[in-house]
Image: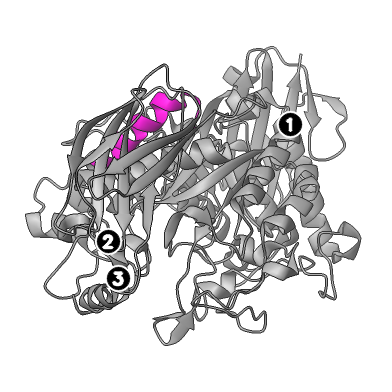
Amino acid sequence: MKHLIFFLSFTIVQFTIHAQMNVYPTHWWVGMKNPSLQLMVHSTKDINKNVIVTDPAITITSVHQPENKHYLFIDIVIKPNAQTGNYTFQFGDKSILQYELKKRETGHSNLHQGVHSSDLVYLIMPDRFSNGNKSNDAFSDLKDSISDRNNPYARHGGDIAGIVSKLDNLKKIGVTTLWMTPMMENDMPRMQEGKYWMSGYHGYWITNHYNVDKRLGSNDEYKNLVKVAHQKGMKIIQDAVYNHVGVYHNTVVDLPMKSWLNQWDSYQGANHREEVFMDPYASNIDKKIMIGGWFVPHLPDLNLANPYCAKFIIQNTIWSTEEFGLDGWRVDTYKYCDEKFLNEINIALEKEYPQLTFFGEAWTNSVPASAYFARNNIKASFNHNLHGVIDFPLNNAILEAVNQPFGWTEGIMKVYMTLSQDFLYQDPNKNCIFLDNHDTNRFFSIIGEDLSKYKMALGLLFTLRGIPQVYYGTEILMKNFKDPNDAAVRKDYPGGWVSDSINKFDSKQLSSNELDAYNFFGKLANYRKTSLPLTIGKTKQFIPQNGIYVYFKTYKDQTLMCVVNTNNDQSELQLDRFIESMKGFSKSMDVLNDNKKEPLAKKFVISAKSFNMYELVK
């Protein structure tokens, strides 16, 4: 490919000037469950492949040098008696590499907790959330050296320090977990997408897997964020990108081997059709293009069927989990990755961290397709072992429920129909459910800025099965469509910068509608935190009738009745139909309104376009 040839030739010129040796993973730990490790050594000159380690606590089992002799892959075994400290690798040309083994973090017990249906995940794009340290907004030695809040396609300066400063605000409204778009270095110039020149402010153009982007902060600052979050009873999910890297990534600028990337005679984009994996009639070329096609020319597609490339990504994911103390992973572009690799990395993560959670972004067109990429009950040609998926079918169903009139397969019936297919998943509670994210139109705009629809949809999100996720600013009605592109739905959180005229982190500065939404969000989210029926209870749903959907959440002797009225008029709901879930209860309490216990009547009057929740009392 033309752009790869350019970078390779450029690299050769650079390497004649000076030499430098780097190793990945940059360090490791004693006491890991898997004692094997593959070191990828990279130099700016040819590396002598004759290598020994001077300490018997480490054994070299194999050495591989690919066609690019700037690289050496050294397989080692770390023995149980290995101590912390530096270990010396000596090469035949007298070169020396010092490799450090560290002690694993044991400072606090709530590491690698996993994320569950009892959590509420809050998605943050760090560059757009809050600027806590103006000194790291821009750096002249990076390829994109500009920070300009007046340019929607440039970096704006949000950072780790800003997130730390807002943790209490988020905890107050019921957030338990932060998921941030990728934190690692994106040292890329602005790249053209369509007619716009975009910066990598979102984090998905990774150029170094072992350094936090210094415009966001440092590795130590990231570790501190995780530690402070844990101290506050909160968790951290990291965003992973297995499928591709930025074109200035060190392994692209100087390719270890041609097969490191999925390469084509001319540029080939992915076809984005996940159906090829489950289609019994699929052609081989369509499968190849789905796996090996590139997203855009500046995002080289990693060949994860290459064992060395696969090991590089697997070990980095374990390294990040250990280094930063993470609780889970959200995996970007999951369906585009080599399937065997995906199961392999999930097994490796579970071996080291049995409680860790990982769910994948498989943007699919149907429930069976979503279930295919998770642990499922489907007889298919390949069995995935992913805990759960980002649940796009349920997302679509909720949005249709509040936007479409009721019909045989339309409106709220779509939620019922979608959930009725949960038998395809081994555990649908491990799916991440959502209303919007950084790749979609803002939820409040999709529903026509209708506060009643907002409460209906948020009520569904917080009470249906799965791990609920909200996008930053949902609680204050941030809005917009992707017009002209994604930047329009990734605007700065008002008040995240000291120069902002309005600070919407301060509830006193919210408009009346924003305050109404904020209070509803916080009340329901905080109630959910301590409600076992909502978080781990069983669901029983009844077929929607006349635009009204009723379902029950039960844990032991605790039962909640949820009622969604999608009609434009108030409706009368007869309760005798639900006797199998209401038997034995004599009173009800309106959780979202007066909290008064009232005797159960034979019917409820349900307000127009509303979400209602009643706690049943014996």
Give the residue drawn at x 33%, y 39%.
89
**Residue 348 included in the magenta stretch of the image:** yes
* Label 1 CA crowd tier, 10 Å (few <14, some 14–19, many 20+): many
Q: In the figure, 166 relative to 446: above or below?
A: above
Quadrant for residue 262, please give it: bottom left
Per the model, the C-alpha gap separating discs 3 and 2 is: 24 Å
Give above or below for 293 relative to 344.
below
> Looking at the rendering, in which quadrant would you find the N terminus?
bottom left
Give the residues drawn in magenta, as a range: 341-356
Query: Closer to the observer: label 3 or label 2?
Result: 3
Q: Magenta stretch containing residue 457, yes or no?
A: no
Q: Which mark is residue 614?
A: 1
What secondary structure is marked by label 1?
strand
- Number of labels in the image equals 3
Find residue 15 and name its label.
Answer: 3
**Is there CB contact under 8 Å for labels 1 and 2?**
no
The one nearer the camera, 63 or 380, is 63
Q: Which residue appears farthest toward the front when viewing the image?
A: 94
444 versus 611 height, above or below: below
| Three-letter code, disc 1 | Tyr
